[in-house]
Amino acid sequence: MNISVVIPLLNEQESLPELHDWIVKVMQAHQYSYEIIFIDDGSTDDSWQTISKLSTQNPHVKGIRFLKNYGKSQALHAGFEKAQGKVVITMDADLQDNPDEIPELYEMIKTDGFDLVSGWKKKRYDSVLSKNLPSKLFNWAARKTSGVKLNDFNCGLKAYKHDVVKHIDVHGEMHRYIPVLSKNAGFTKIGEKVVQHQARKYGVTKFGIDRFLHGFLDLITIWFLSRFGKRPMHLFGALGATMITIGFAFAFYLGLDKLILNPTGRLLTQRPQFYISLVTMIIGTQFFVAGFVAELILRTKQDKKRYTIKKEINLN
């Protein structure tokens, strides 16, 4: 199969038939073998009924329905697990991503040899204050922190080599930083393509201002995982050793001063250096324990499945 199109969605029943027809038109024009995987992330409208109807009309349409709303990252993870195409294309279901971009994205993966190609919505039709400016700030911070030189990490229109989606674990709200996860997994040939952004035609946006706070927190998590995800003891051990060294230095000074330099001076418990020494040694020990626990967790198998599927269509 040439292409798998993975589309997470939440309450997008109005746009689904038009999006489906548009994708099919592109696939037929270029004679691609394909599948379209819709992931219904707990919609409360008739999105699932629309997907079911499309699947009866077109056997290339497949569907996954979550028991409740788990988030876009979990939806993408479920779609990636089922995708069979040599190239996997992700896009949003709100018609703001243009399916006509698919052939060029496909060629960049197959012909140019990229592991991942991210869309760049250079000209946007979103609100300047609510989305454009915060997105620019996020993208700048992500570039500086991760070293991945992309202008638009948030763009839902992306193309992946099959191996990439099978080797990355997208969870929490990490879908914004899939290029960083790919780089950390060893897929370093990451490209970017300017894509057309279209104004929303149906419904309302699902993202509020709180997503930007979550985005910053996720960025910190990504930075930590990329630097110390495989060796947490290097960070916690270094911090712990530093704190314990400071504590012992103060303790040695207090002991030397009390026993030799000034035996008749104040009691040790009346001196601030005593409490500095005590607190730093306790904190240092806690850092060491945190490092050991983190190392143990790394060696423990974890279940990557963080969602419950209610129904599937045309999926084995």
Image (spheres, helix red, strand yellow):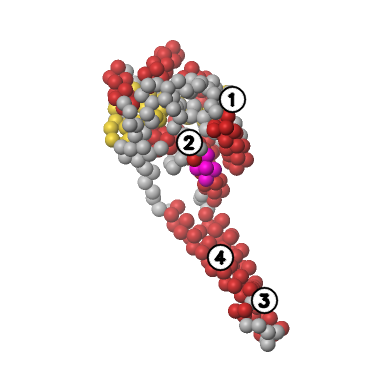
Q: Secondary structure at mark 4?
A: helix
Residue with the mark numbered 1: 122
Question: Bounds of the magenta span?
Answer: 212-217
Mark pair 3, 2: CA separation: 55 Å
Residue with the mark numbered 3: 253
Which of the marked residues, 4 or 1, is nearer the chain's N terminus? 1
* Snapshot quadrant of residue 123: top right
Q: Nearer the viewer, mark 4 or mark 1?
A: 1
Say which quadrant the N terminus sits in.
Answer: top left
Which of the marked residues, 1 or 3, is nearer the chain's N terminus? 1
Q: Please rate how many residues cluster around mark 3, counting C-alpha atoms within 10 Å: few if below 14, some from 14 to 19, many from 20.
A: some
How far from the left and from the top, in percent, is residue 6?
41, 28
How far from the left and from the top, in percent, is residue 119?
54, 27
Q: Secondary structure at mark 3?
A: helix
- Mark 3 residue type: Tyr
Above or below: residue 54 compared with residue 306: above
How far from the left and from the top, in percent, is residue 122?
59, 25
Residue with the mark numbered 2: 208
| Contact, mark 1 vs mark 2 (Cβ under 8 Å) | no
| Contact, mark 1 vs mark 3 (Cβ under 8 Å) | no
Q: Please rate how many residues cluster around mark 2, counting C-alpha atoms within 10 Å: few if below 14, some from 14 to 19, many from 20.
A: few
Mark pair 4, 1: CA separation: 47 Å
Which of the marked residues, 3 or 4, is nearer the chain's N terminus? 3
Is residue 216 a member of the stretch shown in magenta? yes
- Mark 2 residue type: Gly
